[in-house]
Amino acid sequence: MTEQASRDAQNHLGKRFSGQVALITGASRGIGLGIAKRLQAEGAAVVLTARKPEALAEAVAQFPDGTALAIAGKSDNPEHRAEVFDTIAEKFGRLDVLVTNVGINPVYGPLIDIDLDAARKILDVNVIGTLAWVQEAVHHEKLGFRENKGRVVSISSVAGQVPSPGISFYGISKAAVSHLTKSLAVELGPDIRVNAVAPAVVKTNFATALYEGKEEEVASVYPAKRLGTPEDIAGAVAYLASSDADWITAQVLTADGGVITAGGNA
Ligand SMILES: NC(=O)c1ccc[n+]([C@@H]2O[C@H](COP(=O)([O-])OP(=O)(O)OC[C@H]3O[C@@H](n4cnc5c(N)ncnc54)[C@H](OP(=O)(O)O)[C@@H]3O)[C@@H](O)[C@H]2O)c1
């Protein structure tokens, strides 16, 4: 069978990730869990991370037996990352898809007053953390990430595209994630494709302050007239990670119900 024919056959079955292994960081709930469920439903074995082991165990229990594995730890901790990659190497002997989904925003308010230590922490987790996950996946000798034509998809944000008052420094970090995506794609091609998805407001714990009690009003400025769901983002990530997107790299796919084009922000 030619490579294209085998790709078509897999896509027809709706199992674009059969035989593949996907790591999704920050996946005990929200967007990360939605992505993990979608990639698993399309055939991948999935590895989920988050800080709290109990919530991770509850997340894994939602998957068919033996299809999901959880490893608890802080995304910006090098020892945690080493444990994750070594465990994947030992259990599966390969990595095909890396979704860097962890992102934090511990502070709200104007940039002019932002606590600089909080700003450094945001950069550490959102930017340096994202880079570190990619570096270590590529360099790990037993994962074959390059040989497997590995795919990286990072979760950026529309807050990195237009100023979003109140969450500006977070937006700055996400602008860096988007640029990191493009720069890594240029460095790592043709073996590895690197893309990102930039969502507007998605209904998760993380974003409650942005819509709780005012969802209809917030959604009214979205051409789609609704806010996003984890499934909306999962569909975009699955596409970019799949062979359907084989010629797509260095892109930041805005998944925002049209709000940025309509003049809104995050
Ligand atoms: N929701 C939105 O409107 C929106 C819009 C644009 C972009 N995003 C981006 O989407 C990504 C996911 O956000 P979400 O809305 O799904 O958030 P969420 O519902 O709060 O989920 C975050 C997940 O990441 C884990 N996590 C958080 N900090 C971590 C850390 N330092 N190390 C390891 N795991 C960590 C959490 O579990 P633990 O708490 O147990 O660690 C949880 O599993 C983030 O990068 C965010 O910036 C979200």
Image: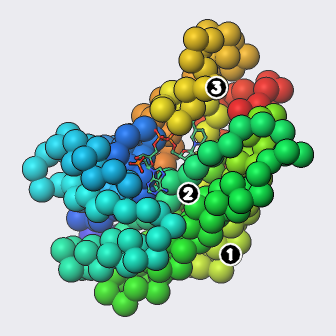
Mark 3 sits near ligand 1, with its Cβ under 8 Å away: yes
Query: Mark 3 or 1, which is nearer the eye?
Result: 3
Q: CA distance from mark 2 to mark 1?
A: 15 Å
Q: Earlier in the sequence, mark 3 or mark 2?
A: 2
Count of numbered badges drawn on the protein: 3
The answer to whether residue 9 is visible is no
Give, as a three-letter code, the residue at label 2: Ser
Instruction: Please say if the residues under marks 2 and 1 sit with CB atoms less than 8 Å apart.
Output: no
Q: Nearer the viewer, residue 19 or 161?
A: 161
Q: Which numbered circle lies on residue 154?
A: 2
Name the outermost residue toward the right: 112
Percent position of residue 154, x then y: 55, 57
Q: CA distance from mark 3 to mark 2?
A: 22 Å
Mark 3 secondary-structure assignment: helix
Which residue carries the number 1 mark? 186
Percent position of residue 121, x then y: 64, 60
Which residue carries the number 3 mark? 210
Quadrant, the N terminus? bottom left
Name the outermost residue toward the left: 65
| Image point (89%, 46%), residue name | 112
| Image point (57%, 18%), residue name | 212
Give, as a three-letter code, the residue at label 1: Val
